[in-house]
Amino acid sequence: MYFRILAKDHVSTFVEGLAHVYEVFAPVKNESGFSFEQVSDGSSIVLDYPMTIIPPKKYFVRSKESLFRYDTHSGDVVESELEVTPRVLFGVHACDINALLMTDKVFLGDYEDPYYKARREHTLIVGVSCMPVLTCMCDTWGTGEVQQGCDLFLTDLGDRYFVTCHSVEGAHVLDTFADTHEATAEDTKALEEHLRAFREAFSRPVDATSLQLLFDAKYNDELWEEIGEACLSCGACSAVCPTCYCFDVNDELDADGNAGARVRCWDSCMNSQFAEVAGGHDFRPTRASRVRYRFYHKFWSYPARYGKTLCVGCGRCDVACKVNINPRRIIGALQEGARS
Amino acid sequence: MKKTHVPVDSSQAYRELRQNPYRPWPARITSITKLTDTETLFELRIIDHKVREQFNFNAGQFMELSIFGVGEAPISISSAPSKKGFIELCVRNAGSVTGALHKMRCGDIVGLRGPFGRGFPFEDMKGHDVLMVAGGLGIAPLKSLINHIHDERHEFGKVTILLGARNPSEILFRQQFDMWRHRDDFNLIMTVDTPDETWDGEVGLVTKLFDQIEVDPAKTVGVICGPPVMYRYAIDEMRKKKLPVDRIYLSFERRMKCGIGICNHCGIGHKYACIDGPVFNYWEAMNLQEAM
């Protein structure tokens, strides 16, 4: 691996250099918290943020996008190109990078989603280390570190970053736009200290032993009625979730009726009618059945298909849910009987 | 700033590489046959001749039907794969897309994507007796299978079709099936919940018809398609006839939106009706939460 040291003083220059060639998106502070926004001025970005409200999935799975436009009469697709601009997402946490690897499995499977793929291929990702807040549980899923999925990763060593280059394009932009120097033995020691402090900062361990089996066996547990009773079906959990990717597809017709667009937008399996078929039969008519479906998808179905839990422990749903429904609570309740 | 334009649906790439699986092919309505008050059989022809010539499918697969300006709906194919150049969809007027389709005329343009999903295991079924149970609109995907079996009738043993509907006027393809009642290569028994003066067939639930048939469990494949409530009862009857769990095939209805295993609308347990189904065997279905 190619390692470099980037002084914190030099981050602004690096970002501004990148902004000449790429659209750069980075966490900035606003009234309600932190969010990824386009930046040109390096001084506006905040790299030691707890979490952004909406994860960076918004750059790959757009909250709303036109798939194509068509001529209503001939059925011909009249717009046939997706415009993608080379981008850098600067300052992405490890959990959110790992989340993208999970949505990759879905969007780049047997059928490739060309929109997602084009955006993924034209976006550089610069990760940044973080320290856990109370809601974080990446320690449970091993998603607090990055093995792949980004181009550069910056680990905070106080006054400088330990930069890991994961791709040649990452190394190239670093060499071109950033003033860095070689890592010394002292830097490596500081890295170890950071990693130790990171590990020790988690204070609320979650027991995920035999989780899939417990989910399966307790499918009809009364827990789901209880949780369904509390759930508001607001869908906030899936909007803020970096691994929720369900979408709906609709047609939008121009005012003159001659042309229209096929548009997709974020959807949530929490919404009533999500599993309704023509004629009105609903396979998940109750809130209990919908909230259960969501957790089963994360902890049973996705792992059964792709071998990994569909949760990176970012804790956003924990913050967003007004009635305290979150993986930590659900897993705790499912484990209760199995505990000694 | 350098912008890159990535082709997402160059026609050729779409045809040959299926580069953009969301893009429908324009297709023309070539024939409309009203079957009942709510169901109509539409025959469609994909306009692009190259696509049309390459088009192939298995019985049990489905298409995504576009009405431009209204939206898309998944519809199972009713015609047999041997009917080249045309695709028949038996459509119930039950939503915005199917409602708009019912207002269209011959010559009008719709969009088609597909075929999607896993159909019936036609090759594996050869050499077996086939016992089909259909309720209501459930006959739509089975019609494709029935026609395909008809094309290669000598490959199959005894073929039995148990067909149920609420009343005689709701029986799909009734004219054809009325004639089939007198054939000796298909044993077709129809039943209705509520008879009228035109009805001289059976009365009662489709599951009652199992009393009238003989099944050799060692060489029979079961196939079930119908309204959600029907599956459990029909499976029970097949199990009573000793059919093994992995030789009972079920075709499920779900709201497939993307058709390609992404949007998650058709999730059944850890499977998707659109890419893993809509046909599952009972062993698979037993292991899927919410399947029935």
Image (cartoon, rainbow, N blue to C red):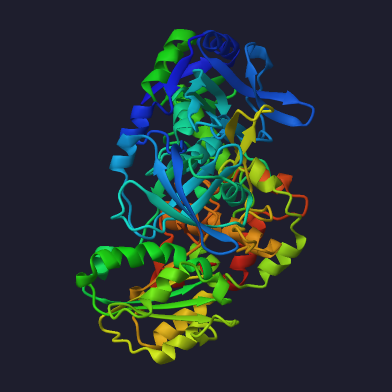
Q: Residue at x 45, y 63 (%)?
A: B140
Q: Is residue B287 visible?
A: no
Q: Is residue A211 visible?
A: yes
Query: Looking at this rendering, what residue extends furthest in the right direction?
Result: A31
Q: In the figure, residue A273 lies in which quadrant? A: bottom right
Q: Is residue A77 left or right of residue A257?
A: left
| Location of residue A319 in the rendering, given as x and y in whole percent from the top left corner | 72, 45
Query: Looking at this rendering, what residue extends furthest in the bottom direction?
Result: B211
Q: Is residue B43 left or right of residue B168?
A: left
Q: Nearer the viewer, residue A103 or B271?
A: B271
Q: Is residue A111 above or below residue A166?
A: below
Q: Which quadrant does the C terminus of chain A fall into?
A: bottom right
Q: Which quadrant does the N terminus of chain A fall into?
A: top left
Q: Is residue A318 left or right of residue B105?
A: right
Q: In the figure, residue B155 lies in which quadrant? A: bottom left
Q: Is residue B34 above or below residue A53?
A: below
Q: Residue at x 70, y 29 (%)?
A: A34
| Location of residue A243 in the rendering, given as x and y in whole percent from the top left corner | 55, 44
| Location of residue B113 in the rendering, given as x and y in whole percent from the top left corner | 44, 43
| Location of residue B283 in the rendering, given as x and y in whole percent from the top left corner | 39, 72
Q: Residue at x 64, y 34 (%)?
A: A252
